[in-house]
Image (tube, rainbow, N blue to C red):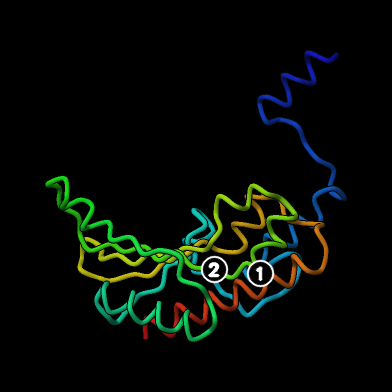
Amino acid sequence: MKKVFLSVWALGLFVLPAYATKGMRENAKSDNVVAGRTTNFKPNRRAKKNGIVKVKSNYSVSETAQRFEAIAKERGLKIIAKVDHAAGAQSVNKELRPTQLIIFGNPAVGTPLMQCNQTTGIDLPQKALIWKDEQGQVWLGYNSPRYLLIRHQLRGCGEEVQQALQRVGNALNSLAQEATK
């Protein structure tokens, strides 16, 4: 019996009863649910697939990065590092379209997430990637808080974690919108 169960489980044929999947189905209906709560945060469709929220920018990569950094500092976020990937590529005689990464955060918001599950630390501090695609469009991208919630299994960690995820989602959305428009 044990072999049959393990085989069924390994093949993905294990079926959960309807009452066990009710919350999963309800949360799957909305992109605006973080930690079981509705938020103002609205990721694009692509964020569902890879966890990255992408926002078109009306500015160059360097101007978008400068705007993002200035707004983040204004809001009390700490800029930890800036990485110019194109400059790194150039240093080894390779070409790369303009691509910059800004690493930033606020320990007061990130710490509760890591207290819930320390693996969240792989995605914290937060990062904003600004790049120019093949068609010349500049984008600003960041990890969706919903992606962090799922990836690091942050459900059931209390109200402080739910509030932190909601604040992160709203702040990232607002920062991205201001820096790109």
Quadrant housing the N terminus: top right
Nearer to us in this view, 81 or 40: 81
- At x 27%, y 72%, the residue is 61
Residue under label 1, please give it.
109
Q: Residues within 10 Å of mark 2 (few under 14, many from 20)?
A: many
Residue 158, how many percent across, how many down?
A: 83, 63
Residue under label 2, please give it.
105
Residue 20, how many percent across, how many down?
A: 85, 48
- At x 48%, y 86%, the residue is 74
Q: Is residue 108 above or below residue 117?
A: below
- At x 68%, y 24%, the residue is 10
Q: Is residue 8 above or below residue 171?
A: above
Residue 93, how many percent across, how many down?
A: 12, 47
In the image, what residue type sits under mark 2? Gly
Residue 28 sits in which quadrant?
bottom right
Residue 140 sits in which quadrant?
bottom left
Residue 109 sits in which quadrant?
bottom right
Helix, strand, or loop for circle 1?
A: helix
Q: Which mark is residue 38?
A: none
Q: Is residue 9 above or below residue 156?
A: above
In the image, what residue type sits under mark 1? Val
Residue 105, how many percent across, how many down?
A: 54, 68
Q: Say whether marks 2 and 1 touch (CB < 8 Å).
A: yes
Nearer to us in this view, 58 or 31: 58
Q: Is residue 96 above or below residue 57?
A: above
Residue 171 located left or right of residue 133: right
Q: CA distance from mark 2 to mark 1?
A: 8 Å
- At x 15%, y 53%, the residue is 90
Nearer to us in this view, 90 or 14: 90
